[in-house]
Image: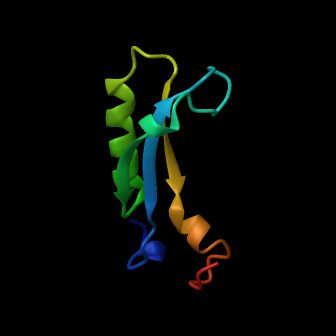
Amino acid sequence: MSEENEGKQLLHLVFGGELTELEGVSFRDLDKLDVVGIFPDFESAQTAWRSKAQMTVDNAHMRYFIVHLHKLLDPDGDGIAG
């Protein structure tokens, strides 16, 4: 973590699922979304994302994403929830 962000919770959500088409981000079945977890920093989220993406490399429609929850919770970055 950089010194600037040290002590701040920069939460990231990693999740994925099978897409209906390769070009979009519409999921085939919302009941089958794979919520990998919430991580305290981008580095650990990226490690989890990479692991899941590699496990599903044979399915071109399977995609995993990292959502920057901290940006949704505090869009202004001022430490005050949105």
Is 75 left, or right, of 33 in this rendering? Answer: right
Residue farthest to the top, as pictured:
58
User: How are the colours assigned in the image?
Assistant: rainbow
Q: Percent from the top left, x then y, of residue 14?
A: 43, 48
Q: Percent from the top left, x then y, of residue 38?
A: 38, 58
Q: Is residue 50 above or below residue 42?
A: above
Viewport quadrant of the C terminus: bottom right
Where, by quadrant of the figure, is residue 75 drawn?
bottom right
Q: Nearer the viewer, residue 20 or 66?
A: 20
Total count of labels: 0
Q: Is residue 70 above or below residue 52?
A: below
Residue farthest to the front, as pictured:
31
Q: Percent from the top left, x then y, of residue 45?
A: 38, 51
Residue that appears at 44% across and 44% down: 15
Q: Percent from the top left, x then y, of residue 11?
A: 44, 64
Q: Nearer the viewer, residue 15 or 48?
A: 15
Is 19 left, or right, of 11 in this rendering? Answer: right
Viewport quadrant of the N terminus: bottom left
Residue that appears at 49% across and 47% down: 66
Is 22 left, or right, of 43 in this rendering? Answer: right
Q: Is residue 12 above or below residue 35?
A: below
Residue that appears at 59% across and 66% down: 71
